Amino acid sequence: MNPGGASLEPASEADLEALHALERRCHSHPWNLRHFASALRDASTRTVVLRSDAAIIGFCVVQVAADEMHIHNLVVAPERRRQGLARRLLHDALEWGGGAGARRAFLEVRQGNLAALELYRGAGFQAASVRRGYYDRPREDALVLRREIPEPDP
């Protein structure tokens, strides 16, 4: 299956500017180039992109530490949303994390981001806690979501 006609592949240093540009389009408090460069260098972190006609239309950054994974960033270009692309990125992240030994996944999401909450709840995430005032521009609480990851079949 290839939702939205996009290919999924590991990000590279050559993608830094495009990752940063898409991040700035989608978030009011975006990561900077150093955040992306650091993620690409970190062996415990996986950064993948979705490409369509050579353009990056989505990405996901996930990190595994011990038996936990954290989804740091999941973005799809606004004009490409509601095509199953975020679900595809999330599925890839959970598969990779489970294969790397994670048994639990965590992420933070704006309390008012109803589309993201629908995606994550549909994937089995549940609210674990609230981080008051976590986000700026506008100021908003974050919901910390958690999901168990089953051990992969041998």
Image (tube, rainbow, N blue to C red):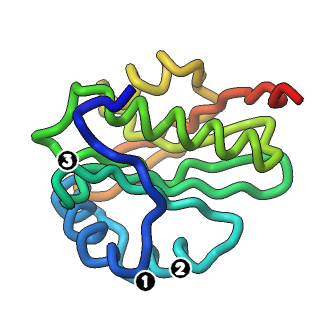
| Above or below: residue 147 compared with residue 54 | above
Q: At 44% across and 40% down in the image, what residue appears?
A: 89
Q: CA distance from mark 2 to mark 3?
A: 22 Å
Residue 116 locus on image (x, y percent): 36, 31
Q: Secondary structure at mark 1?
A: helix
Q: Secondary structure at mark 2?
A: helix
Residue 142 locus on image (x, y percent): 46, 42
> Residue 147 is drawn in which quadrant?
top right
| Above or below: residue 8 compared with residue 5 | below
Residue 71 locus on image (x, y percent): 55, 48
> In this image, 46 relative to 16: left or right?
right
Q: How many discs mark residues in the rendered view?
A: 3
Identify which amino acid the numbered label 1 is placed on: Arg
Which disc is residue 51 wearing?
none
Using a 10 Å C-alpha cutoff, classify the residue at mark 3 as few (fewer than 14 neighbours), some (14 to 19) or many (20 or more).
some
Report which residue position mark 3 lands on: 77
Residue 14 locus on image (x, y percent): 34, 80
> In this image, 128 relative to 100: left or right?
left
Q: Earlier in the sequence, mark 2 or mark 3?
A: 2
Q: CA distance from mark 1 to mark 3?
A: 21 Å
> Residue 39 is drawn in which quadrant?
bottom right
Q: CA distance from mark 1 to mark 2?
A: 6 Å
Residues at circles 1 and 2 in contact by the CB criterion of under 8 Å: yes
Q: At 79% across and 25% down in the image, what residue appears?
A: 150
Report which residue position mark 1 lands on: 34
Identify which amino acid the numbered label 2 is placed on: Ser
Q: Earlier in the sequence, mark 1 or mark 3?
A: 1
Q: At 64% across and 57% down in the image, what residue appears?
A: 63
Residues at circles 2 and 3 in contact by the CB criterion of under 8 Å: no
Report which residue position mark 2 lands on: 38
Q: Secondary structure at mark 3?
A: loop
